[in-house]
Amino acid sequence: MATIKVKQVKSRIGAPKDQKLTLDALGLRKLNRVVEHEATPQILGMINKVRHLVEVVD
């Protein structure tokens, strides 16, 4: 399956608790960190939930 790289580009301060937990589940704990995941429907759903805090990089 294809992999996808996700970078946190906006601070989690002020975000609701469920969005903070979603960032933790993605492995994004600090600003400008990049993590790599397989592009499963579950991962894509988590990225969609916090799409205003992250970006997909190539």
Image (cartoon, rainbow, N blue to C red):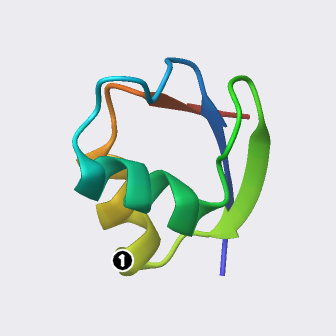
Residue 52 falls left or right of residue 7: left
Identify whether 48 is placed above or below 56: below
| 35 or 16, nearer to the observer | 16
Residue 52 falls left or right of residue 40: left
Q: Which residue is at a point 68% across and 67% down the rendered structure image?
A: 37
| 18 or 6, nearer to the observer | 18
Q: Which residue is at a point 57% across and 19% down the rendered structure image?
A: 9
Residue 42 falls left or right of residue 57: left
What is the secondary structure assignment of the residue under circle 1?
helix
Q: Which residue is at a point 40% across and 60% down the rendered structure image?
A: 22
Residue 50's spot in the image, x, y percent?
Answer: 33, 42
Q: Which residue is mark 1?
A: 41
Quarter location, residue 6 = top right
Residue 1's spot in the image, x, y percent?
Answer: 66, 82
Residue 31's spot in the image, x, y percent?
Answer: 68, 25
Q: Amino acid at mark 1?
A: Pro
Residue 40's spot in the image, x, y percent?
Answer: 47, 78
Number of numbered discs present? 1
Residue projecting furthest to the top? 10
| 48 or 3, nearer to the observer | 48
* Residue neighbourhood size for the residue with mark 1, other residues' Cα within 10 Å, grouped as few (<14), some (14–19), many (≥20): few
Quadrant of the image containing the C terminus: top right
| 38 or 47, nearer to the observer | 47
